[in-house]
Image (cartoon, helix red, strand yellow):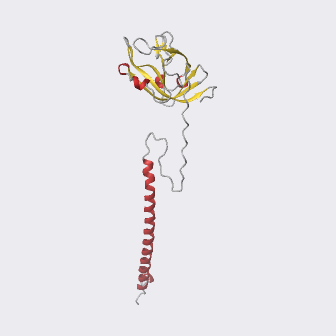
Amino acid sequence: MRRRRPWYRSRAYRLTRTAALAVALVVGGARWAHDDGTGAAGAAAAAPRAVAASTQGPDDGARVDAAPPHATARPARPSPPPPRPLARSRPTRVVIPYIGVDAPVIGLGLDRAHRLTAPPEGDGHQVGWYQDGPSPGEQGTAVVVGHLDTGTGPAVFAGLGRLGRGHLVELRRADGRSAVYHVDSVRTFEKAHFPDQEVYGARGRPELRLITCGGAFDRRSGYVGNTVVFAHLTETRGPRSDR
């Protein structure tokens, strides 16, 4: 007796299975092609964002990124106007909070070689102001000098080289006003190549130079250089209303 062929091996079943598989491949292929196109567009849209973020440097203060299309840019805050220069008045004290300086100021002039003199050697805690130049807060470059050290130890400007950009220096004046400066930079120059114009020259706004000894020390001639703090006026304080 001839055995009956199982249903899953019949010709009709095989034809039906082949047709169903072909339909599934066609539908699935169309869907895959549609999804691939969407994914590629999404990757292309995200690429500028990734590239922009990668441009951030080690010193960047904010993330550099692409803004969403719907975002609106915020207007930049206007920077405060510079303070008006003050009228002339001699300084009485210099205050530098970051290095703990709060010292009296005396007037200084030039010696016979037209070099700025220094405060008395015996008192390392006095600061000298070049009294023939602009006063603190006045238009021009005010110059203040002090000792780095004395024979007995550190002096008033021993920490001057630790100042950095943004540190505050306040010069109190005889008229009750104060001129507040912010540090721009601190540099050391050899005395043999001291840039007079760069240090003492006017810059079109009220500025300040703090000067002390710096560089290597020679037992015969002393320090071979000078440390100079460059700062500009950012605020005036006091009872008067002549800002």
- The foreground one among 183 and 88 is 88
Left or right position of 11 against 131: left
Residue 192 screen position, x and y as percent: 35, 19
Could you tell me which residue is drawn at 51 percent across and 11 percent down? 123
Between 125 and 130, the one nearer to me in the picture? 130
Q: In front here: 26 or 125?
A: 125
> In the rendered image of this protein, does residue 20 appear above or below residue 168?
below
Q: Position of residue 217 (x, y in %)?
A: 39, 16
- 15, above or below 37, in the image: below
Q: Is residue 170 above or below residue 43?
A: above
What residue is shown at x 54% (from left), y 44% (from top)? 76
- Where is residue 66? Give x, y as percent: 47, 52
In the rendered image, which quarter contains the N terminus? bottom left
- Depth check: give the residue in front, 191 or 153: 191
Q: Farthest residue toward the bottom? A: 1
Quadrant for the C terminus in the image: top right
Q: Residue at x 53, y 28 (%)?
A: 181
